[in-house]
Amino acid sequence: MSEAAKTLSPEYKEALVELLFQLADDDFFFAYRGSEWLGLAPHIEEDVASSSISQDSMGHAAMFYTLLEELGLGKADDLAHARPAHERKNSILVERLNGPGNYMEDAQYDWAYAVVRNCFYTLAKKVKIDSLKQSTYGPLAEVAVKVNMELYYHLLHWKTWFVQLLSTTEDAKERMIQAMDKVMSDFDDVFSLGSHAEQMKQFGLIEEESVLKEKWTVALANIFESLDLEIPRKVNPQSQNGRNGEHTKELDDALSTLGEVYKLDPVAPW
């Protein structure tokens, strides 16, 4: 356990641990879904770029898991790979499949969905990271500063794709609108802070949910205004909240794939 962790009150630590699991699990599965596009992206330059972003995102997850390890929660590798689905705190959005089929056979992934999910999620992550830079937990604020340096380029990349696809053919625009409906139906718990939301606010770990969501909405509105479009409304929003351990079968399948190599040799570093 780190020296910083030893001085925390039980209540503060409990809220901090909850927040760190949300941040770590979100990036862990976001990176995994991104990695499934390796070799399948629209062109070779995008294959390299999106793979690099996925690698960065997995690195961010590793930093959050390491903070949990320093708090005495166990090895970062175990926290990433060995926890069952009902213990996961990620949002529903990041566990969703890229499309029909699977990576090794008959993959029919939806690039419009990938662009919308990645753009909306990365913008939400930027809002959270900006808030975390002011966190009262010093080690978390320091990690946020490091993550933010890469996040600027990630967001620029996905915003560029987003604007381009909505500014080309009618077919591309229609596919993007359908993807936005799908993403928005899963977006309710992205800004949820779970059962410890009030404590996180009280201890100054991160801004409250409504403030974060409003900042995201304003930033998204700026993009849509440049396209002369309206922000999509939620269509049949999902009732599950991943922050409370409520997940889909898609997460179980992802964990089975992600943990396959780890379970062969749990003592090896990931």
Image: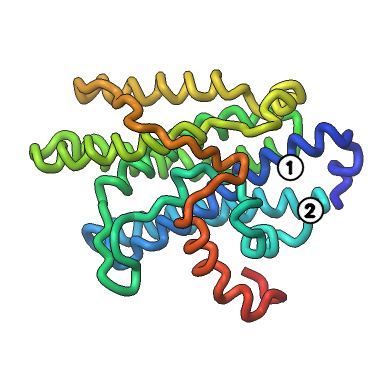
Q: Which one is nearer the viewer's eye here, 128 or 236?
A: 236
Quarter of the figure that contains the C terminus: bottom right
- The kind of residue on which mark 2 rests is Leu
Kindly indicate the quadrant of the structure image that contains residue 129. Answer: top right
Q: Tell me the residue at 24%/61% (across/down).
A: 108
Q: Is residue 126 visible?
A: no
- The numbered dot on residue 215 is none
**For the point 27% across and 24% down, which residue is it?**
224
Asked if 256 appears above or below 15 in the picture, the reply is below
Q: Which mark is residue 73?
A: 2
The image position of residue 246, as x and y in percent, is 56, 45
Q: Name the residue beneath numbered marker 1.
A: 17
Mark 1 lies on a secondary structure that is helix
Residue 182 picture location, percent across and down: 32, 39
**Residue 68 higher or lower than 39, as above or below:** above
Residue drawn at the location 74% of the way across and 37% of the way down:
16
From the viewer's perspective, is residue 77 above or below residue 127? below
Q: Earlier in the sequence, mark 1 or mark 2?
A: 1
Q: Is residue 220 left or right of residue 24?
A: left
Q: Are marks 1 and 2 in contact (CB under 8 Å)?
A: yes
Q: Secondary structure at mark 2?
A: loop
- Give the residue type at disc 1: Val
